[in-house]
Image: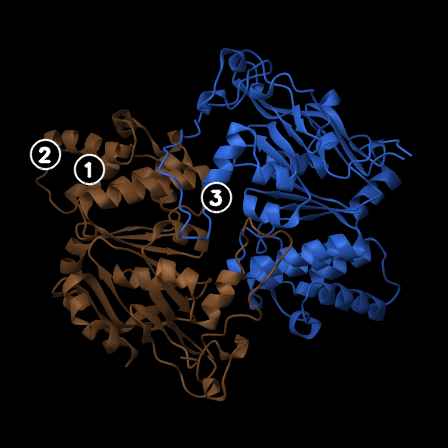
Amino acid sequence: MTTTAMTTDTALRQAAVLRVEDLRVHYRTPRGPVKAVDGVSFALREGERFGLVGESGSGKSTTALAIMRLIRPPGRIEGGRIALGDRDLTALSEEQFRRVRLAEIAMIPQGAMNSLNPVRRIRDHFKDSVRAHDRNVGDAQLKERIPELLGMVGLRPETANLYPHELSGGMKQRVCIALAIALRPKVILADEPTSALDVVVQRQVMQTLGAVQERLGAAVILVGHDMGLLAQFVDRLGVMYAGKLVEVAPIGDIFREPLHPYTQLLIASLPTLEERGVFRGVPGLPPSLLNPPAGCLFHPRCPKRLPQCATVAPELREIRPGHWAACHLY
Amino acid sequence: MPPLLEVRNVTQIFGDRRKGETVALDDLSFSIDDEAPSFTAVVGESGSGKTTLARILLGFQQPTKGAVYYRGDDLGQATGRAQDQFRKEVQAIFQDPFEVYNPFYKVDHLLAVPIRKFRLARSRAESRDLMVDALRVVGLRPEETLGRYPHQLSGGQRQRITVARALLLKPRLIIADEPVSMVDASLRATILESLRKLNQDFGISFLYITHDLTTAYQVSDNIIVLYRGAVAETGAVERVIKDPQHPYTQLLVASIPLPDPARRWGETVVAASGSEANGGPGRGCPFADRCPYVMPVCREQAPPLYRTHPHQAVACYLHRGTETVLDGDISQAFREYAPAGAP
């Protein structure tokens, strides 16, 4: 199994705050199941910033939603185990899991700023979230806590009295970060938290998220397709392709020496400020998840494919210390 | 010969005195030459006026002041033949490759309409040949594209079809408003490459409107950096991006998330862009409130464009004493600029 290798690493097991093992999420369609996430495993270390990168349809957002148990039909978690510390989250009932959400694992979803209720003031959003977990939190306590939370994301206390439309995009996004950390979670999941923002604001929001994470000592999973943003923020990166993790390594190692041909092409395709007028796309298109190719899912596009790539699916193995790749080249 | 497209003192103001005015574009002048195909980027964050500019250039909107001239004719006054010529020769590519399609029609429809409207083909076979050629130029296989519905194609394929559609009319100028911002990173390079190829092989000029400095640097010759409706900095793209002189451009360049973990953002905390509306005319430098080098003069009057280099002009009083751009026509700072009427 691809999965056990990573999690039997005892050192990792001890330090891991969240472990995802052999996660499978399928969407049922009349033409058969779409395997959006197919056997994904990784361990998130304490205080770590872990990135999940991939093109649209690679399963990165589905993985994040599955961890939050927010997959909607026709999607379904078909298998796998998600553990927070020593606790198996997959064994929890809906009500038990509701208590975990926000309090222990919080999510900043894609376009989070649009999730604010336009007819409620910012402070009401905090009240609702906090009281959903503890009905006994009094007004006096909240009066102290809300400005503190807003302060942590660089917003003034008066922001609490405003309505969402009175805030800029970057401010709303920071409110969402403040909401996510309201109950001091151990894990923060951020799915493209800055995709609608300008570069300067994006930098501010990411720096805010980083500062807040360090203060709480929480671990962060950052999901995105922008390799630049991930390079700026994460410690370790997992590259997803067609529902599988194809490479996992410390961010410096992945950029210095990407092992998987897909990662190599992805990094080579990034526009830089070094060369002008040089374009290298990744040739071909991602496979249909309804009728995936046999063997390695990347083999039809792979410039380095070997004969066995068309028949045998490669396992994710540790090729170098801490550097994992699913490829027959190694 | 007049330039292909000339923007002369264009100002766009939204709202009114009573409710407060927003200056979306402030006295912008530049031109796009007809002789040599060019690739010009217009860069700015949301609220910089870049989409307003696209709308005015396409004739969707009349500017409050100033005018746009196409081959010497005022676009606002153009009728009949001149208008037809403009609609054929100037094409647009928009941001969302999903929105331009009617889901009930096969993609052929999108290509067939311009062929019919502009009578480009005399027969069905000829029409099909045109479509096939255009699709091949943008790197699509016609047998995998024609006869399909939009939902059967990926975002990248759909965006390439809109490029093919623009190409059908053999335009002189393509205005592309964020053409790759909704396309996956791995496909962006391919689409930008096909735009650059059209520029070089077919002599089509491009106005590339984007918030992404990195891709602007990749494809463009010249760049216009807009901040709240005014030109902050302009000139040859290597000059402006590699050696920015305006504090705003410097902030933008420093905020690019470089795909290099060894070169991370500095920890400098930058001032957020305020949400207040742009003041009316006669305001000072729009960047004054966020500028680390702000001086009293910056709040009194907007700075003119100073030519810090033959191919770079900067609207910032830090460069006072340098000669200014004549008549505010920023194309003087463009590379390979040939003034209108020159031999």
Q: Position of residue A167 (x, y in %)?
A: 38, 31
Q: Chain of mark 3?
A: B
On screen, residue B113 above or below A39: above
Q: Chain of mark 2?
A: A
Picture colour for chain A: brown
Find the distance from the CA under tag 2 to the CA under tag 1.
9 Å
Query: Which residue is more in the foreground, B16 or B264?
Result: B264
Q: Secondary structure at mark 3?
A: loop
Return the mark for residue A127.
Answer: 1
Q: Earlier in the sequence, mark 2 or mark 1?
A: 1
Q: Which chain is blue?
A: B
Q: Position of residue A64 (x, y in %)?
A: 31, 60
> Is the C-beta separation of discs 3 and 2 under 8 Å?
no
Q: Is residue A222 left or right of residue A184?
A: right
Q: Position of residue A169 (x, y in %)?
A: 41, 37
Return the mark for residue A138.
Answer: 2
Name the residue type under label 2. Gly
Q: Is residue B152 left or right of residue B196?
A: left
Q: Is residue A235 left or right of residue B79?
A: left
- Model colouring: by chain
Name the residue type under label 3. Ile
* Identity of the residue drawn at 80% across and 51% down: B203
Q: Secondary structure at mark 1?
A: helix
